[in-house]
Amino acid sequence: MIPNIAAFKTLIKERVGLHFFNGMEGLLNAALHQRMTERGKESCEQYYEVLCVSTIEFDKLLSLLTINETYFFREPEVLDIVCEKLVPRILNQREGPVRILSAGCSSGEEAYSLAIKLHQKYHEAFADRVDIHGCDIDTKILEKARAANYSSYSFRGVDPLLQQNYFTRNGNQFQLHDLIRNKVKFHRSNIVKEQLQPQFDIILLRNVSIYFDVETRRLLHFNLLNMLQPEGALFFGNAETLANNFGILKLKQEHGHFYFCQPKTARAPTPTASVPPRIVTPVAPAQAPFVAAPMPTSQQCDIWIKKALTCVADKRFAEAETLINQVLNSDAQHQEALVIKAAIALEKCEFEQTAQSAQQVLELDEWSAEAKMLLGLAMMWQHHTQQAIAWFKQVVYQQPGYWPAHYYLAEMYRQSELPRPAARTYRITLQLLNAEMNNTASACALRLPLSFPTNSFRFLCEHQLAQFTSQDGQ
Ligand SMILES: C[S@@+](CC[C@H](N)C(=O)[O-])C[C@H]1O[C@@H](n2cnc3c(N)ncnc32)[C@H](O)[C@@H]1O
């Protein structure tokens, strides 16, 4: 058993809501062992630290933890109500496509089932009448959803004629026809913390909330409140609905089936205010090229930068790089683009590239704390501890309130076996983190597309300080 498994459980729950009830700890344990083995000899503490800072590694672990069980036309009565009652009703009331989201879509069967049913109902006209989206936290399963190539396991109980009409058999696999496949757009999104906008008319969130505890499900409801149109409908799986009745959304019954909708009163403020709503743009197919405008303007560059930041947040680094290169092709000295380029390289563990882009930024602006922070991180990951210390010190000097720089400086001191400066710097980091939590900190943030989850870092500081105390006592 992993010794500090509780810390891993907290980190995962905080980030994506998944709660490892006692019976599921074995799954977490096995996944952690697998990743640590695959990465080589690493202690649990080292691996925890990597998880805190590397979104790529976090996603790899997550793919081993999510339960992706799904199949076509699961709990079909709800799909009937959506396609036969709700969609026609909305289309009668207003113009424009009905927006539907399959949240926690896994490998896409639910979203594609809806698309097939709506195609059967509206034929070619379905293209204009509905917009169908799927989202999931698991990037690996989303690749499968986009590929739309299934084994017979996904077709439990599906009418063979329907399978024949919409899929082409290829050995043991069944490829969904492009007419349906292209109708569904998939997004990497964390349904607990992020919002897909604009709002949806219908959200299906089935067989997902069972992996969350009550506290997370309540947060989820506030989040969903903001993702749902005023007249929209939210469906949970049949067995989940009552366990989700918190009075935040209103429970409605139609044809013997329950769903949630907006209460008539004004919307309640969301308690996740610290997480700004994000607009996640539809995911283009992996190979789709971004077409450069013939005459890029600074306005066009701003749009590319915004899109690139969204891609980075979604970990679609190849797309982000394409956009950043477009900006740099039109303005080789675009400082923000260079910073983002360096950050992407860091995420991809291409440390030389990080250093190169960050140095370019410093040539343009010798006071760029962003560039210095990136250089510090790149040096740290390459085990150039003294150089990392020098860069982090400069950031701390310029931005004394920026706790991530203090934290990594403390780490470098610890690794250099300098316990006193390390302990002092961990304590400063904790003070800054507490001030931030109590809103007494003077606002200090670098413009970096990297996330530093405060609770995890607080845990790490406390852990290291406790280690120092116990060593002193020996
Ligand atoms: C059991 S599948 C459900 C698939 C489909 N909705 C169904 O009912 O057949 C659960 C899915 O929820 C996804 N999931 C878990 N936590 C999530 C989160 N915080 N945000 C988005 N998706 C999440 C998992 O990755 C998994 O693919």
Image (tube, grey):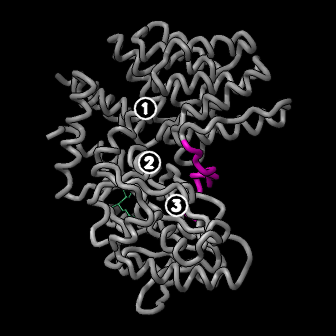
Asked if marks 2 and 1 touch (Cβ < 8 Å), the reply is no
Instruction: Note whether 81 is above or below 123 in the view shown.
Output: below
Instruction: Note whether 196 is above or below 339 in the view shown.
Output: below
Residue at image position (32%, 11%) is 417
Residue at image position (51%, 79%) is 82
Q: Residue furthest left?
A: 1
Q: Is residue 274 magenta?
A: yes
Please tell me whether the stretch drawn in magenta is mainly helix, strand or loop: loop
Whether residue 133 is visible here, answered yes or no, is yes
Residue placed under numbered mark 3 in the picture? 180
- In the image, 444 versus 142, the foreground residue is 142
Magenta region: 270-285
Position of residue 149 measured from the top left corner of the image (x, y, whole percent): 39, 51
How far apart are the alpha carbons under marks 1 and 3?
35 Å
Q: Earlier in the sequence, mark 2 or mark 1?
A: 1
Residue placed under numbered mark 2 in the picture? 147
Residue placed under numbered mark 1 in the picture? 54
- Mark 1 secondary-structure assignment: loop
- Mark 3 secondary-structure assignment: helix
Residue at image position (57%, 26%) is 343
Q: Earlier in the sequence, mark 2 or mark 3?
A: 2
User: In the image, which is nearer the foreground, mark 2 or mark 1?
Assistant: 2
- Mark 2 secondary-structure assignment: helix
How far apart are the alpha carbons under marks 2 and 3?
12 Å
Instruction: Note whether 290 is above or below 6 in the view shown.
Output: above
